[in-house]
Image (cartoon, rainbow, N blue to C red):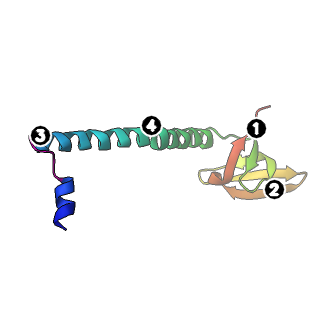
Amino acid sequence: MINSIILFAPPPGQDPGASMISTLIMFAAIFMIMYFLMIRPQQKRAKEREKMLGDLKKGDKVIMSSGIYGTISSIDERTVVVQVADNVKIKFEKSAVAAVLKD
């Protein structure tokens, strides 16, 4: 037990606060790397998705999360009605829209 405590002690003549500062700098660097590689891109994708869902309009060709292709025939605040064939319309939650197809 005492040997493990001695291993974590700073070398003689060195300020114990210096090793703590370097540890804090390392944790800050790891946090920044995680933020820029994982958190920020996810937030950007979420914003783009919210913008896409907000810009939906009647006549847009869409792909639903279930893989169904269709055209929006009506839209309200929470749902969209998608026409998938002649006289075949299906009502979905707005969040089920996976992508808007470009013409």
Residue that badge 1 annotates: 101
Q: Which residues are magenta?
A: 9-15
Amino acid at the residue labelled 2: Lys
Label 2's element? strand
Amino acid type at image mark 1: Leu
The mark nearer the N terminus, 1 or 4, is: 4
Q: Which mark is residue 89?
A: 2
Lower position in the chain sequence, tag 3 or tag 2: 3
Q: Which mark is residue 14?
A: 3
Quarter containing the N terminus: bottom left
**Label 4 crowd (10 A; few <14 / some 14-19 / many >=20):** few
Q: Main secondary structure of the magenta part?
A: loop
Distance between mark 3 and mark 1 Cα atoms: 64 Å
Q: CA distance from mark 4 to mark 3?
A: 34 Å
Numbered disc in front, either 1 or 4: 4
**Front position in the image: 12 or 86:** 12
Residue 89 is situated, as x and y percent measured from the top left of the image, at: 81, 56
* The furthest residue to the bottom: 1
Q: Amino acid at mark 4?
A: Phe
Alpha-carbon distance for marks 4 and 2? 42 Å
Residue 17 x %, y %: 13, 42
- Judged by depth in the image, the label closer to the viewer, 3 or 2, is 3
The earlier-in-sequence mark between 1 and 2 is: 2
- Using the numbered discs, state the Cα–Cα distance from disc 3 to disc 2 in whole angstroms: 75 Å
Left or right, 43 with reference to 57: left
Marks 1 and 4 sit apart, C-alpha to C-alpha, by 30 Å
Question: Which quarter of the figure has residue 91?
Answer: bottom right
* Label whose residue precedes the other's in the sequence (3 or 1): 3
Q: Which mark is residue 36?
A: 4
